[in-house]
Structures are given as structure tokens and as C-alpha cells.
Amino acid sequence: MSGVRTEKLQRLDQETLERLIEIYMRGYEGMREYGGEGESYAKRYLRWCWDKAKDGFFIAKVGDEIAGFIVCDNDWYSKYEGRTVGAIHEFVVDKRFQGHGIGHRLMEKCLEYLGEHNDRVELWVGEKNKKAIRFYEDYGFKRVGQSGIWVRMVKDLRRDDIPPEKGK
Ligand SMILES: CC(C)(COP(=O)(O)OP(=O)(O)OC[C@H]1O[C@@H](n2cnc3c(N)ncnc32)[C@H](O)[C@@H]1OP(=O)(O)O)[C@@H](O)C(=O)NCCC(=O)NCCS
């Protein structure tokens, strides 16, 4: 898709928040169990993301329209790792724009950013979200654990191979 650009979100005003909620709700259509309980949840969650990881909140724009976003946190204490790592808290492309390479653009931006600060990235993805899991695996993320319906995946930013956690 031509005319896509990625940039850091400058401020989370009301209009932007509403657009991000719309993308989030649409992006997770048909996967409600992984996308929260509705708009008020989305609003609280996206505000939390903004407060936690302003510097790594990237959006993709097609013309003037926000088409997707990724929230990358360079200061996340992972109790599973027992230390601070990078984390991807959210990653969604509007359903209308999926499958055109926007997700790839956002992921590249994210990994470039986290690579400046972290040696490992962690994320959680719904176990039935096969498309996203495959997408992450193509980037070298490995499944290292599971908690309920959520699969934990990690990627080492400076080495290729990450051994699985004991017992997984
Ligand atoms: C996961 C997600 C963010 C990926 O975003 P996306 O914009 O659809 O991803 P892309 O288009 O970059 O890549 C997906 C596929 O689209 C196709 N594609 C990629 N670039 C393309 C292009 N330039 N033109 C056409 N199709 C393209 C490819 O089939 C690609 O698969 P590949 O990985 O084998 O290359 C999106 O599916 C989404 O929002 N899902 C719902 C929310 C979600 O599950 N988030 C993750 C939670 S942890």
C-alpha cells in the first residue's frame, strides 16, 4: 500500500483516543476474548499504554488517517524474566487496512526502537490468534510459556536463539 508512514504519536487527545479505540475494537472483531470487554475497557487500557510508554507509542498513517498502532515499552519489569525487558503492550491494524504490510512497518519501527534500549522483548498473544502468532514467529519470536488463554513469546534482540523456559 503506498503512502503509509509511521511516526511517534505526539499527543493522545480526545479525537486520537477515539480513533485508536475504533481501530482496537475493529481490529479485534471476532476475537473479543483477547480484545477486552468493550469500549470503556479499551479507553482505560489505551490511556494506561500512553502513560506507561509514550516514547514507544507508534502509529501508522495512510494519508491523514491513523491505520494502526504499536505500543513498545522499553522499561517493563517482567516477573517471568526476573528483570526489565522490552515489551509490546498492544499492536493493532484497523481491519480495513490489514494485509497490506502496515503491521510489518509498525513491527520494524518497534524493534528498531526497543533494540536501542533492550536485549529482549516480551509479548502476550491469545492462543487462538494464529495469524498474530505466525506473524511474530516470522520475526523470530519464540513461544516460551502460557498462562490461561495467553501465550508468552519472547525475542532476543541481539542473539537469534532463545532456549525455552524449563518445563514448557
Ligand atoms: C497482527 C496484525 C497487527 C498484523 O497487521 P497487518 O497490517 O495485517 O500485517 P501485514 O499486512 O504487515 O502482514 C500480514 C500479511 O499481509 C500480507 N502482506 C504483507 N505486506 C503486504 C503488502 N505490501 N501488500 C499486500 N499484502 C501484504 C502478507 O500475507 C502478510 O503475511 P506475511 O507475514 O507472510 O508477509 C493485524 O492482523 C491485527 O491487527 N490483528 C488483530 C489484533 C491482533 O491480533 N494483534 C496482536 C495481538 S498480540
Image: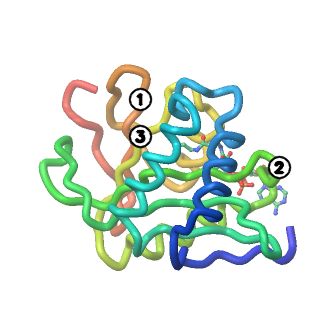
Number of callouts in the render? 3
Q: Position of residue 37 (x, y in %)?
A: 52, 28
Up the image or down, 5 lies above or below 13; here it is below
Q: SS class of the residue under badge 2?
A: helix
Q: Residue furthest top?
A: 148
Q: Residues within 10 Å of mark 2 (few under 14, many from 20)?
A: few
Q: SS class of the residue under badge 1?
A: strand
Q: Residue furthest front?
A: 14
Q: Is mark 3 within 8 Å of ligand 1?
A: yes
- Say which residue label 2 marks: 96
Q: CA distance from mark 2 to mark 1?
A: 26 Å
Q: Position of residue 50 (x, y in %)?
A: 42, 62
Q: Is mark 1 within 8 Å of ligand 1?
A: no
Q: State which quarter of the image contains the N terminus.
A: bottom right
- Say which residue label 3 marks: 124
Disc on res. 150: 1
Closer to us: 116 or 70: 70
Up the image or down, 103 lies above or below 74; here it is above
Q: Quadrant of residue 27?
A: top right
> Disc 2 residue type?
Arg
Q: CA distance from mark 3 to mark 2?
A: 24 Å
Closer to us: 168 or 27: 27
Nearer to us of marks 3 and 2 is 2
Q: Residue furthest left?
A: 82
Q: Residues within 10 Å of mark 1 (few under 14, many from 20)?
A: some
